[in-house]
Image: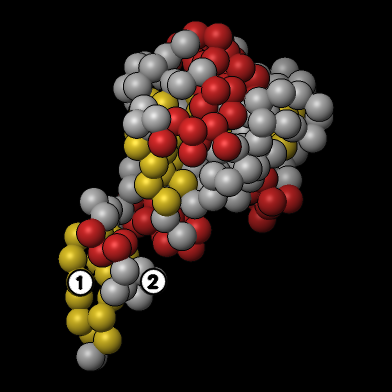
Amino acid sequence: MKKIITPKEAAELIPDGASVMFGGFMGCGNAHKTVAEMAALGRKGMTLISNDASMQKGPDGSTFYGIAQLVHNKQFDKVIASHVGLNPEIAEQMNAGTLDVTLIPQGSLVEMIRAGGAGLGGILTPTGYGTIVQEASHVHSVVDIDGKPYLLERPIKADFALLCGFKVDRAGNVWYKGTTRNFSVAMATAAKTVIVEADNLVEIGEIEPENVMTQGILVDYIVSGKGA
C-alpha cells in the first residue's frame, strides 16, 4: 500500500529549486489540485520539464489553467519543453531575461526522458544536426554512424514527477484517460520521487492488469482523489 497524502502535503514535499516533470497535454492531465497548492505555497527557482506550459484560459473557464498558474507566479527559473506558444507569458519572461527556455522537439524530449529513466547515456537523433541546436547544452556531441551524422543528446532526469491518473489503485497502479497519458509513463521512470494525483482512487484489482500504464512500484505517493 502506498502512502496517501493530501494535495497540500504533496506540494510541501517539493522544495525551492527542484526540477519537476509534469504530465499532461495543454494542462489536461496536470495534477490540478497539487499544482494549485504549489501556486499557493509560492516555491521559487524550480525547473519545469513538460511537453508544454499549459494555457492561460482553460477548457473549464479557469484563468491560468494547470501549470500556467506556476508560470504566471514566476515560480520557474528554467523551462524544458516542446511547445510553449499557447502560454505567451513564457516568451514574455524569456525576453525579460527572467526565464531560461530550452525547446526540444517532442519526439526527442520524450526519448531523452525515457533514456533518463532507463539509465542510458543519451539518445541519437539526426534532428537538429547542422543547426544552432548543435550548440545547445543538452547536446553532448556529434556522432557518425555508417557515414550519417547524429546528435548525441543527454538523458533527462528530475527530482520529482507530478502526474495525474484517471484511475489509481491503492498500490499506486495507474490508468491514464486518453491523451492525458502523454509523457507520464516515461516521466514515472525518470524522477527520484513520483507523485500521482488520482482523479479516482480505487481498490486494488479494479484496474485490469493489462490496463496498468504506470506500475505501482514506480510511485512513491498518491494524492487522494474523488474516490478517497
Instruction: Using a 10 Å C-alpha cutoff, classify the residue at mark 1 as few (fewer than 14 neighbours), some (14 to 19) or many (20 or more).
Output: some
Q: Quadrant of the N terminus?
A: top right
Kindly identify the residue that appears in the image at 65 percent across and 36 percent down: 55
- The numbered dot on residue 202 is none
Between the residue at mark 2 and the residue at mark 1, the CA separation in whole angstroms equals 11 Å
Q: Quadrant of the C terminus?
A: top right
Q: Amino acid at mark 2?
A: Thr
Task: Give the left or right position of residue 5, taking residue 43 as reference.
Answer: right
Q: Amino acid at mark 1?
A: Val
Front position in the image: 188 or 170: 188
The residue that disc 2 covers is 127
Front position in the image: 33 or 217: 33
> Element under label 2?
loop
The residue that disc 1 covers is 142
Nearer-N-terminus badge (2/1): 2
Q: Is residue 186 above or below residue 75?
A: below
Picture quadrant of residue 192: top left
Kindly identify the residue that appears in the image at 35 percent across and 75 percent down: 126
